[in-house]
Image (cartoon, rainbow, N blue to C red):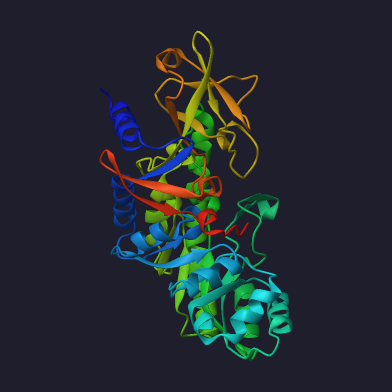
Amino acid sequence: MTARAADRARYDRATAHLDAPLAIVDLEAFDANADDLVRRAGDKPIRVASKSVRCRHLLERVLAKDGFAGIMSFTLAESLWLARSGFEDILLAYPSADRARFAELAADPKLAAAVTVMIDDPAHLDLIDAARDGGTEVVRVCLELDTSLKLLGGRVRVGALRSPLYSPAQLADLARTVARRPGFKLVGIMGYEGHIAGVGDAVAGRPLRSRAVRLMQATARRELAERRAAVVRAVRAVVPDLEFVNGGGTGSVQTTAAEDAVTEIAAGSGLYVPRLFDNYTSFTGRPAALFAMPVVRRPGVGVVTVLGGGYPASGVAGPDRLPVPYLPEGLSYDSQEGPGEVQTPLLGAAADDLLIGDRVWFRHAKAGELCERFAELHLVEGDRVTATVPTYRGEGQTFL
């Protein structure tokens, strides 16, 4: 029996008393992935990206481990909810225009102490001030660095379209603006190098593209390390007591951690290891989060139909954004139908061994987005479900 077949047998036994559709997290794999992230980060703490987890119980579990400290959140509403739930160090990774929540933040000492918000433009400060509604608490802010690689004089750009702050001078200028502005405190710098951390460099069947990605990433790492160090020096000249410099992601933990200027690493997807992380040479994780759909039809030889399954991930639409049939091995989508909203036909010899009511296990393309589809996660240890915990959705929280 292969390791994957053994996992399928365990998951089937563990959830035999439950009806599918359902989602699980294999805690042994989750903990092993967490340990590997810590190993790769060396002596630098990992701030957990909550959007890649979206379950308070599992955020608490990973933050209880040595090597993890703090949360990187994705909306201001989520940040305040987490702070009210007892989490104490929350970095909002994206700028917000949520005036009502800024009023709450500026009026509550506990929230203001726990939450740091992201800015990359003086207009963000104006919006926050206009939203205070009498609140006088000092708002902690972080500057976001544009980590993109620019070549040929800027005519070629590789990286996400995020912050407009690229040069040390630009970040230092905004740091001075914050320092002069009453009611704000600059505490950090963040830069997410998605073109390094979030792009696989070993795509199956595409050796030339994989080589090109590796060359691009090597160039980008060198350029960013030099520029980020210069940015930090420039900002510290304005704000000497800067608390943190955050960088990286699951795919770049060890290389970002090697930068002296970086004080902490962001990661989250590496805990669940969705299918998009199968194409990396820098690390190998264990799939920890899966969902099961029941077989409801057997249309013919080599075909079964499961309920639902059409859970595409965000990003540029394409086959790599689809869930992948994982267990049993050897199943694939019908090219004419793909995964459907209500039913999904699956092809392959393994289909002939599946009966009505059996389940097929899938891996989502991305990490936390799976939790937008399920209200609860069944936590598996060995061949037993040892707990069932709510996702954000299960707690009635749908932030985006």
What residue do we see at 60% from left, 68% from top? Answer: 77
> Does residue 341 lie above or below 186 as drawn?
above
> Residue 218: horizontal and vertical position, in percent?
47, 48
> Residue 389: horizontal and vertical position, in percent?
41, 54
* Quadrant into which the C terminus falls: bottom right
Kindly give the residue lying farthest to the top in the view shown. 301
Instruction: Tell how many labels.
Output: 0
| Whether residue 249 can be seen here | yes
- Residue nearest the observer in this picture, 3 or 15: 15
What residue do we see at 58% from left, 73% from top? Answer: 117
Q: Is residue 237 left or right of residue 39?
A: right
What residue do we see at 65% from left, 37% from top? Answer: 317
> Residue 331: horizontal and vertical position, in percent?
47, 21
* Quadrant into which the N terminus falls: top left
> Does residue 204 lie above or below 271 as drawn?
above
| Whether residue 230 can be seen here | no
- Residue nearest the observer in this picture, 34 or 120: 34
Residue 263 in which image quadrant: bottom left
What residue do we see at 40% from left, 43% from top? Answer: 24
> Residue 348: horizontal and vertical position, in percent?
47, 15
Q: Is residue 396 left or right of residue 126?
A: left
Kindly give the residue lying farthest to the front in the view shown. 17
> Does residue 247 lie above or below 155 as drawn?
below
